[in-house]
Amino acid sequence: MKNKIKIMFFGDIVGKPGRNAVKDYLVKLEDKPDFIIANVENASHGFGLTQKNYNELLSYGIDCFTSGNHIWDKREIFLYIDEADKLIRPINYPSETKGAGYRIIEKNGIKIGVINVLGRTFMTALESPWSLIDNAIEEIKKETSVIIMDLHAEATAEKVCMAKYYAKKGVTGIFGTHTHVQTADERIYEDCCAYITDAGFCGDDEGVIGMCYEASIKRLISSIPERLDVASSGRNRVNGVVITVDVESGRSEKIERFNELIINNEENIIMKG
């Protein structure tokens, strides 16, 4: 069993362009990570996740899927989420909600705990996550020291506060999602917890956080609700982070962002930083 592992985290995957971007990126990637996590709440036409797309993403080699407030947008999620043992919904939905708020996933003899949390500032009001996270950490630490948290939240201050607090409790990595814009503040708190305020997104590079510009601007100008479709210019981008982790202690030793433009012309995949 390895003493050091690399964990890759993809920011919010938006629609088919996002799914294709992740697939192409992983195909071209030479230094393969040991474990891959991706946020998939927008993976099916920008809203929610179908079972077909869940299985598609599994086939790319992704080991765990986190989500957020949009995970419920495709109604079929309620039919399969309990059996989808690699998919996590935010932990602070009511206890009777279908699905799991955290999971422990084993790969190549190494167990990794993954927690999903929904922020409460400028977001849908849910239960306070603090005690729920504490309980999840306690349970996970019975089996592994490696704990990753997807913090799906709007407010930077909330993300930073939660990261500093849970770094002191030995969490390995806390990665922000939801805004679809990658931040440049990656760091390691308390010499153990890798952090970034937002990992960014995977999807069309010419759209508005992955969605088509025309509908987005019309909605802003008119203030009238407008159907939003996924952008599809053929120029896709992948955002995320890779961390290096000491398995025994669960401490992150390094965090690196990646931000790549991917153009697939059917003959060759071109990656540009």
Image (cartoon, helix red, strand yellow):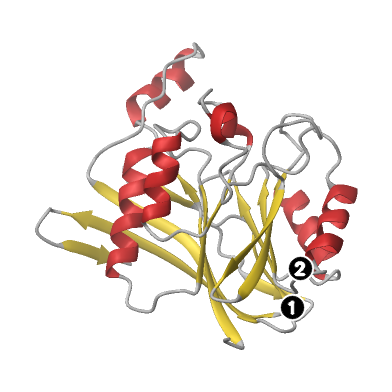
Label 2 residue SS: loop
Across and down, in percent, residue 240 comes to: 49, 61
Visible residue check, residue 204: no
Quadrant in the rendering for residue 129: top right
Q: Amino acid at mark 1?
A: Cys
For disc 1, the neighbor class at 10 Å (few under 14, some 14 to 19, many from 20) is many
Q: Which residue is mark 2?
A: 171
In terms of sequence position, does the residue under pointer 1 or pointer 2 come before the other? 2
Q: Tell me the tag on residue 192.
A: 1
Q: Residue at x 40, y 40 (%)?
A: 53
Label 1 residue SS: loop
Where 201 sits versus 273, above or below? above
Quadrant in the rendering for residue 267: bottom left
164 and 6: which is toward the camera:
6
Across and down, in percent, residue 200 comes to: 50, 53
Where 130 sits versus 260, above or below? above
Of all residues shown, which one is farthest toward the right? 131
Compared across the picture, whether 138 is left or right of 237 comes to right
